Image: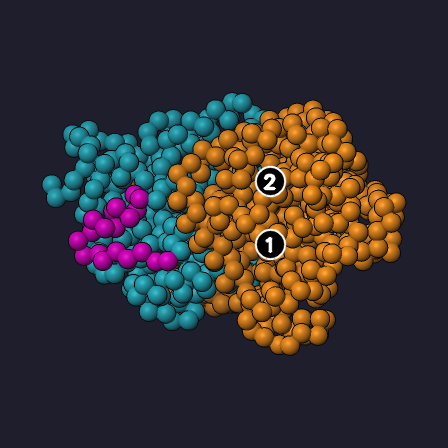
Amino acid sequence: MELDANAFARNSRKALSDKALQEALGRTTGRFMLHRAAAVAAFPGFEEARERASAIKMDVLAHLDAYLGRFVEEAEKRGVVVHVARNAAQAREIAARIARDEGVTLAVKSKSMAAEEISFNEALEGAGVTVVESDLGEFIIQLAGEAPSHIIAPAVHKTREEVSLLFERHLGEPRTDSIPELVGMARRHLRAKFLSAGMGVSGANFLVADTGSLVLVTNEGNGRMGAVLPRVHLAVVGIEKVIPRMADLPTFLRLLPRSASGQAISSYVSIVTGTKRAGDPEGPERMHILLLDCGRSAILEGKYREILKCIRCGACLNACPVYQSVGGHAYGWVYSGPIGAVLTPLLVGLPGAAPLPDASTLCGACAEVCPVKIPLPDFLLELRSDARDQGLKTPGEIAGMKGYAGVMKRAGLLEAIERIAGVLGQFFTKGKAIGGMPYPFSGWTERRDFPVPAAQPFRKQWKIRRGVTR
Amino acid sequence: MPYTTGMDPERSVPVSLFFTCLADAFSPGVCHAAVEVLERFGATVRVPLSQTCCGQPAFNSGNRKEARAMARKFLGSFPDDGYIVTPSGSCAAMVKHGYPVLFRDEPRTLARAREVGERIHELSQFLVDVLGVTDPGSDFSGRVTYHDSCHLRRGLGVVEAPRKLLRAIPGVEFVEMEESDRCCGFGGVFSVKHPQISCRMTERKVERILATGAGTVTSGDLGCLLSIQGMISRYGYPVKAIHLAEILAGKPKGN
């Protein structure tokens, strides 16, 4: 996916004035949050599961090579061909080669954020393969020519009216405002594709090392259908998705649907283990797993390792008041919200996504809901500090900070400045709040007044009242 | 003695007031109110006059060199023993959680930062958890709603203390707003870097406040109140943002 993260400020302003987007965002994130809260409240073991999941992931990350080795060994035993891509270009090359070698011309794809990272669809289309998105949300935005704006609800930014318009234009369907009817239209259209596609493409929520299985958590069943109906199955998965044992899976399944959509369990949980065996009624004859590094092993070595614990539930997006205000596209890449604000700079480099770590008030709502306890606000702070070290701050900001720190060195100097500001402020405003301030504070007062400094700061008042000097 | 406190009235509790630079410059009344409430419950309040700013805006914007200089100054401004109390969840959280990050490579300063962090309390937390106050003895009256400042609630884990105190004021009708724990959009430097998003968030907060019909909204952080009162003042909404310390102190006495 094309990177546009440096335009965060411009993109977010656009999003704030987009009425349909604001309506869709308010409705969906609010619903997700309510459902999540109810699901968590109804499950007393949630905190314990979070602790356990976090510990399992930390163990995986400490021995990632060993667990991946085991996974590859077990998967290959079961007829799977495993590929590893260091970067997006290599991943695209491998994916296109697989499609060509397998003689595929039509592929049905279920949701995969990892595939978005490498611009998978473009790669296959370049190799002459038509890729049809089969997740309803992905199907909608594919028709619209857009990118997903949410990890689990890619078309969250679209209203039903917009969807009906798209179906009319691209599928020749009549206009409707009934969601079941819209779903029916998509299902009819997709069923034909499922039956004729040579390859099913998926991501994976988990890779299970001790069985070589991949686990798909979906609500529409499209993931399972794509994994068993076509002759070939290709899964595109980040290397951090491995978990040690099948016995660890329940811990994660308790957390993922509850955190994502507030469901106790999703409609479908598919465990795909190897190719079709003799006697199996269905299943792919050929199965490929494309493991993506794409910056992950570099993250593993550094101070941000814990970000790789992420299970892509999207809870931090729903909880984030900034995401709720601007939506996913403003973040300018695959991942949005708090996880995107941390992960994008780490995967594409901070210079390509410098504004993202600033896109947070550090309110901590994300860390509160994260099912694997990633310290997202700490990482945002750390990245902001990296930005200074990497020379990505504006000279104005640095000069401002130096001046402010200089004043704060001496209480006497601060008091003198406060007193001057107090006298001037009171003189010019006659005690009324300030309605407009100069750049860089002009935005602050666009729809808010700013208070006038007190005529006398507290320190001075205290000295006078209590007759003290130190 | 009309007020209830778990402390022995004979034994005075030494408290250093960390008055915060924001209140110092914009709302001295908040600092006076904090002193008044603390003295009401037997604390001997000392105000170290060399304190300036804890350095949070620099730390939060990633300018750690400057933040470190201010943090060092802060650590040197307060005495080696006794409680440190501040009418700000955010500034207390900065000292408690931010300083250990700033000084992670300086063991001696880190030890001092941790030790100071142990002694620092936000005002309502101190009153309830340390002094055992159940009734603040305030004559404030009216319908009041409470906004959870993010750093007080999630940073320090203080949720109930301010509510307990507000509910105990005889003249106060306490009402919860919806989404009381949702960020008001201030975020310090965030409100300067992303004023439009900040305003959008403040707008939603103000909507929730107005929906309660309260005449007063309060919070444990002046930053939040700056943003909330700023919007209230711009649009002339029929509600006032008043810091928790001032409500606990009672009817305003001087500025």
Disc nearer the start of the sequence (2/1)? 1
Dot 2 amino acid type: Cys
Position of residue A412 measured from the top left corner of the image (x, y, whole percent): 45, 43
Instruction: Give the numbered dot on residue A310.
Output: 2
SS state under label 1: loop
Using a 10 Å C-alpha cutoff, classify the residue at mark 2 as few (fewer than 14 neighbours), some (14 to 19) or many (20 or more).
some
Using a 10 Å C-alpha cutoff, classify the residue at mark 1 as few (fewer than 14 neighbours), some (14 to 19) or many (20 or more).
some
Give the residue at x 80% y 56%: A106
Q: Nearer the viewer, residue A428 or A226?
A: A226
Report which colour depicts chain B: cyan
Give the residue at x 74% y 36%: A278
User: A189 left or right of A313?
Assistant: right
Instruction: Identify by letter the chain in orange.
Output: A
> Is residue B164 a member of the stretch shown in magenta?
yes
Instruction: Give the numbered dot on residue A220.
Output: 1
Residue reaching furthest bottom?
Answer: A174
SS state under label 2: loop
Q: Confirm whether residue A41 shows in the render.
A: yes
Q: Looking at the image, how many numbered discs can be counted on the residues?
A: 2
Position of residue B236 measured from the top left corner of the image (x, y, whole percent): 38, 71
Position of residue A467 measured from the top left corner of the image (x, y, whole percent): 29, 42
Q: Report the magenta residues as a range.
A: B160-178
Mark 2 or mark 1, whichever is nearer to me: 1
Position above or below: A418 against A52: below
> Is residue B39 a member of the stretch shown in magenta?
no
Q: Nearer the viewer, residue B141 or A26?
A: A26
Instruction: Give the numbered dot on residue B165.
Output: none
